[in-house]
Image (cartoon, grey):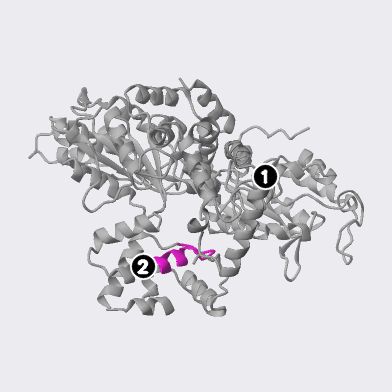
């Protein structure tokens, strides 16, 4: 099994469920990339930060955009710069090496010690993108033809890949990974999460806000359900505003921190004002 | 080891492969499971299931395969204990309810042999696959079954094992991931994701993208004098026509169709997107707006749109025989048609080889004669995530998609 000093147990500011911790540890031990999926605000990205912090390793983040190509992560050969330099005689352009810049994956491979590599929001890129990385992640090496050089990982990085499921990931890619879907935290878990951020929050306030929060999430047809970060913002606003817990039970101050979309706000207000008590949504409390 | 479980997963519809199975077995041998069912559940799932859409099927398989194991004597003892003294475990009841419950309990004890009951309970626990409310046989709430008449659920009893998480079997039994299944109906986002696949990239339009490779080549040939080369950017060339049934039998699916419609219209993904409505079947007119009956002759579709347009027709295809086969068969009394609907449908298929029919009703209901007939004209798919994906495959495949014969 893993060395005792390498076992991930969550970190001070990040609450990981026990199954998730186990899976992180298995992924590290077997050297397999870990694919994390889940609703926005369930802490997918933070997981990588937390692993890096808990295991005291450097974190390299590769943010994926719609235009990102797999090759960008390996290295970029800046031909335009070289071409430009060639026009003026003041620079030596014979050394190609100075125009080869390692991408995030390349940096992770070249690192002297094991790092945590976060490939964030992989689904933002083209559908074929993950497939282009198959070999590199499998073998943990790639080849730079311009230098005739093989970059081999000195230490297999701990690879965490997050996806918002905008696009589905290819099967061949997923086969090589370990997969975990983070569910939206339940109230008990959420209570712990809030306490990490606001350790001295009043019990009553916490209970009332959570009650309200999950109630709003149940409203049918919201375009964007409020997530953890919205809840935390809301609580912060309530605490700064010195709002009494009893007040939350009767109205919702700072609704704008929870619902950020006009239509949602309108829908919510309409539904909650029509019939007090007999709301048009699933009753939960 | 567990090889049956592999096949069971396959049978339940989890697309698990040998590679994944082998990694799982490898992890198993390396001892990551600490011989606990909980570890097996979570880690097994992480290795074998690669989409939350299949979590539910995994849960079912896990429940079926390991379900017998969790019914340990420990659990039965607890149940027995509860049955002997259920009152203090009950949720808050009014005095009347409490009295009634007590009365029922007494009657019940008179009627039943407790040991026999436990035997039955054990069997049913194994059989039972999901939470159950009401009814007369299963264990659940509010029913008339001897088991759990007042709010007892087997998932509520802790099953042995470690204390660090909910019992795996309980999670599996709860089927919390049911809503993530792929064969359920779509939401707007899922629809958009599916529609995104409907694309054919071609270089079109003005030359405004810098072609680096060409620029370098050209520049090198010019001996270092920089020569910029531009090219056309790649664009999606798909043109889509959506034809939607607004007939009465489609009412239950209005929301579903709205989602498909809003997904398609929100996407700035298509070169062109047109939509028309019809009522039960297509005749010589389609409607731009159903509310004020703004008509467009169906002929116009043929003259205005070339055969490269992709056509998606959404409807339940379920109508009276005459509506499809007869002259003047249209359901609207004010409307006459001199050609039967089926002729128009066949003409549409002929003119637009890339056309599919999406049916919001379940496949099991496609036996109806008009549905059957129409599914022989157009390839027909269910309006679900999987169905939509298949439909889009059919729309983008080079060969003409064969219809069911």
Residue bounds of the magenta highlight: A210-224
Q: Which mark is residue B382?
A: 1
User: What residue is drawn where x is 40% and y is 23%?
Assistant: B25
Q: Nearer the viewer, mark 1 or mark 2?
A: 2
Question: In the image shown, does B185 or B172 lie closer to the viewer?
Answer: B172
Could one spot residue A253 in this view of the protein? no
Residue A132, relative to residue B233: is it above or below?
above
Left or right relative to B247: residue B73? left
Q: Residue at x 32, y 31 (%)?
A: A32
**Residue at image mark 2:** A207
Q: What is the chain identity of the residue bearing mark 2?
A: A
Viewer-nearest residue: A11 or B152: B152
Q: Residue B32 versus residue A82: which sits nearer the camera?
A: B32
Q: Position of residue B207 (x, y in %)?
A: 42, 48
Describe the element under mark 2 as helix, strand or loop.
helix
Give the image quarter of residue B264.
bottom right
- Residues A59 and B272: in front is A59
In the picture, measured across the screen, residue B279 lies left or right of residue B209, that is right
Cβ atoms under marks 1 and 2 closer than 8 Å? no
Mark 1 → mark 2, Cα distance in angstroms: 44 Å
Please say if A183 is above or below A34: below
Residue at x 53% of width, y 59% of height: B266
Residue A202 included in the magenta stretch of the image: no
Q: Say if residue B183 shows up in the picture.
A: yes
Residue B105: give x, y in percent of width and height. Answer: 61, 55
Give the vertical position of B283 relative to B154 (above or below). below
Q: Crowdedness of circle 2 by 10 Å Cα count: few (<14), some, many (20+)?
A: some
Tell me where residue B57 appears, x and y as whole percent: 54, 38
SS for tag 1? strand
């Amino acid at each position: 099994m893993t060395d005792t000093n390498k076992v991930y147990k969550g970190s001070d500011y990040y609450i990981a469920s026990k199954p998730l911790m186990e899976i992180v540890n298995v992924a590290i031990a077997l050297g397999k990339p870990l694919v994390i999926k889940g609703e926005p605000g369930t802490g997918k990205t933070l997981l990588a930060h937390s692993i890096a912090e808990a295991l005291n390793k450097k974190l390299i983040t590769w943010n994926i955009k719609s235009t990102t190509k797999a090759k960008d992560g390996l290295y970029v050969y800046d031909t335009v710069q070289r071409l430009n330099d060639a026009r003026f005689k003041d620079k030596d352009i014979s050394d190609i090496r100075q125009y080869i810049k390692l991408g995030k994956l390349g940096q992770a491979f070249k690192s002297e010690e094991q790092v945590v590599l976060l490939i964030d929001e992989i689904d933002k890129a083209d559908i074929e993108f993950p497939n282009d990385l198959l070999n590199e992640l499998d073998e943990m090496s790639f080849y730079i033809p311009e230098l005739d050089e093989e970059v081999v990982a000195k230490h297999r990085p701990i690879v965490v890949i997050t996806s918002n499921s905008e696009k589905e990931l290819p099967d061949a890619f997923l086969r090589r990974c370990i997969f975990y879907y983070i569910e939206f935290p339940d109230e008990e878990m959420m209570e712990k999460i809030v306490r990490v951020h606001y350790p001295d929050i009043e019990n009553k306030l916490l209970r009332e806000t959570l009650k309200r929060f999950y109630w709003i999430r149940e409203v049918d047809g919201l375009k964007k359900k409020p997530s953890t970060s919205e809840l935390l913002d809301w609580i912060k606003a309530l605490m700064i505003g010195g709002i009494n817990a009893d007040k939350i039970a009767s109205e919702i101050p700072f609704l704008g921190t929870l619902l950020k979309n006009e239509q949602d706000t309108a829908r919510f207000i309409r539904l909650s004002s029509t019939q007090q008590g007999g709301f048009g949504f699933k009753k939960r409390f | 080891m567990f090889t049956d479980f592999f096949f069971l997963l396959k049978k339940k519809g989890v697309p698990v492969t040998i590679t994944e199975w082998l990694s799982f077995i490898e992890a198993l041998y390396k001892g990551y499971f600490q011989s606990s069912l909980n570890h097996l559940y979570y880690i097994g799932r992480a290795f074998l299931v690669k989409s939350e859409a299949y979590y539910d099927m995994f849960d079912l398989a896990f429940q079926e395969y390991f379900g017998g194991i969790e019914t340990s004597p420990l659990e039965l003892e607890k149940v027995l204990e509860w049955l002997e003294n259920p009152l203090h475990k009950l949720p808050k009841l009014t005095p009347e309810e409490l009295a009634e419950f007590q009365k029922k309990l007494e009657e019940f004890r008179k009627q039943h042999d407790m040991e026999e009951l436990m035997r039955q309970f054990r069997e049913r626990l194994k059989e039972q696959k999901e939470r159950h409310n009401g009814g007369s046989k299963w264990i659940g709430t509010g029913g008339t079954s001897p088991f759990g008449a007042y709010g007892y659920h087997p998932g509520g009893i802790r099953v042995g094992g470690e204390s660090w998480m909910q019992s795996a079997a309980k999670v599996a039994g709860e089927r919390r991931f049911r809503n993530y299944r792929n064969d359920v109906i779509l939401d707007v986002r899922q629809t958009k994701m599916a529609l995104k696949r409907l694309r054919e990239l071609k270089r079109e339009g003005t030359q405004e993208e810098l072609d680096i490779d060409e620029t370098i080549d050209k520049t090198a040939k010019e001996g270092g004098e920089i020569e910029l080369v531009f090219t056309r950017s790649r664009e999606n060339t798909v043109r889509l026509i959506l034809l939607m049934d607004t007939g009465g039998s489609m009412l239950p699916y209005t929301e579903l169709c709205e989602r498909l419609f809003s997904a398609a219209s929100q996407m700035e993904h298509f070169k062109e997107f047109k939509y028309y409505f019809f009522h039960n079947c297509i005749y010589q007119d389609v409607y731009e707006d159903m509310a004020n009956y703004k008509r467009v002759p169906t002929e116009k579709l043929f003259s205005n749109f070339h055969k490269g347009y992709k056509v998606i027709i959404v409807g339940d295809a379920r109508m009276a025989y005459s509506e499809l086969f007869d002259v003047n068969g249209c359901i609207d009394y004010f409307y006459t048609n001199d050609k039967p609907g089926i002729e128009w449908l066949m003409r549409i298929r002929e003119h637009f080889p890339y056309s599919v029919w999406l049916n919001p009703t379940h496949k099991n209901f496609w036996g109806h004669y008009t549905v059957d007939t129409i599914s022989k004209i157009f390839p027909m798919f269910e309006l679900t995530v999987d169905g939509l994906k298949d439909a889009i495959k059919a729309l983008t495949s080079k060969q003409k998609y064969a219809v069911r014969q």
